[in-house]
Amino acid sequence: MKRLFTIVCLLLATLTLPAQYRRPPYGDLYESVTVAAMREDVRFLASAALEGRKAGSEGEREAARYVSSRLEEEGVDVLTGPQGEPFGIRQENGDTLSSHNVLAFIPGYDKSVADHYIVIGARLDNIGTYELTIDGEKVTRICYGANGNASGLAMLIQLASMLQRNKVLLRRSVIIAAFGASCMLGAGSWYFLNRSFSAVDKIDAMINLDMLGTASSGFYAWPSGNADLTQFLSNLSATLQPIVPQVVTREPCFSDHKAFYDKEIPSVFFTTGMYPEYNSEKDTESILEYDNMERELEYIYNFAVQLCCGPRPLFKLDEATAARLNGKMVVPYYECDVKPTFLGSTDPGVFLQKWVYAYLHYPAEAVRQGIHGRVLVDFLIDEKGNVKDAHVLKGVHPLLDEEAVKVVGASPRWKPGKVRGKPVISEVSLYVEFILERRKNR
């Protein structure tokens, strides 16, 4: 009886929680706060008043103002002002078309990687044309319809809100981006990467949201053939999720991820694909499946948190590294969930003091020649804790370099680092110092 009373009390407590903290059931019987917000966003972004949000139009500028205001309402720090960051596109007739990017920022908590970014983007414009060269021939493509991309923008706003509320979970920082003039060969994303954002080398990965409104026809993820992102998707999909995307090897369509891929930034494209009305110039808000969009949103949120907190995905491995690792992923020491330990300590300084300097022999010839300095040694700790592939990243002299690599390579086993509870290959870089004592004058 006491147990039954406790259960009833817990149920009553749950029902009295504010709506934004309750997990509503999926389905048509109850419209959640998230679904209601996405529905309202789509109604505005797909409305006839915006005339399709064509690149450079007043409708696109109004959409930029709307997205900026909605992000501010959700507490996200908007970087680009009330109507976004303007940029110009020179057209074939010599005229300049003016478009806008909307950018917002969610800070990460970990000082060691907070200056690294995950970019999450969606297409701001809707109606437009772009050209592609296929087998040597120019092909013109048209993009329009409410699902391209009012659904992605609505989901971007809600995703930003969820990440903002839970930013204490994010090691890396997040850039939220609504890209203008995407239908014009991804002009907005190109401008962001080549003119606007100064820390492109600190972008660790990109998530692209485009046409996400009809999951009954399929929910897809295209990781651009990237092995690390494919592994991220596989790991997450193996857990309990409301919906799981099908990982595809063929690019669904042209979108903003392309500009990031060209910069060798790992990118994943989430989409439900083109819908039957895609080739209709009419707005098609009524066909969007909001309950499925909420499921997709939860999966993509979990994926984004995983990317923000996990190891940096590699774009590609050089041939020598790939052969050495046999396709296995290497995780930098500081990005391990559980860092490698030596004699019970995660501080590499302990390894230096208790092993390296205890067994380091200063080469006699180096002493005679007065050679000294710091050798930067890089090495791997495999899943069993063995030290492998010790090599010099920054040397001083062959005599010192060889001794440093020899001592590090002879290390006893470590306790391996872990990511998501599983042992991984981790990479450590540290300086080995060779110091000559000065003799005092008598």
Image (spheres, rainbow, N blue to C red):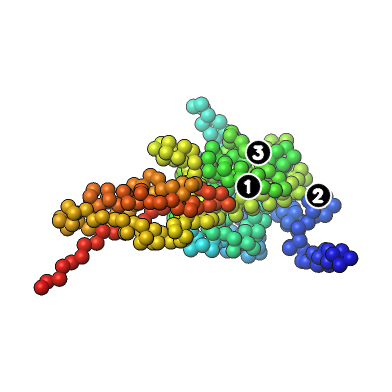
- Confirm or deny contact between disc 3 and disc 1 (CB under 8 A): no
Q: Secondary structure beneath disc 3?
A: strand
Q: Which residue is mark 1?
A: 236
Q: CA distance from mark 2 to mark 3?
A: 22 Å
| x, y percent for residue 370 | 17, 58
Q: What amino acid is at disc 3?
A: Gln
Q: Which residue is mark 3?
A: 246
Q: Residues within 10 Å of mark 1 (few under 14, many from 20)?
A: some
Q: Residue furthest bottom?
A: 442
The disc placed on residue 27 is 2
Is residue 400 shown to the viewer in this render? yes
> Going by the image, does 250 lie left or right of 345?
right
Where, quadrant-wise, is the N terminus in this rendering?
bottom right
Q: Secondary structure beneath disc 1?
A: helix
- Disc number lying in front (1 or 2): 1
At 65% from the left and 59% from the top, the residue drawn is 161
The disc placed on residue 438 is none
Image-quadrant location for residue 139: top right
Where, quadrant-wise, is the C terminus in this rendering?
bottom left
| x, y percent for residue 112 | 47, 61
At 53% from the left and 49% from the top, the residue drawn is 423
Nearer the observer, 321 or 21: 321
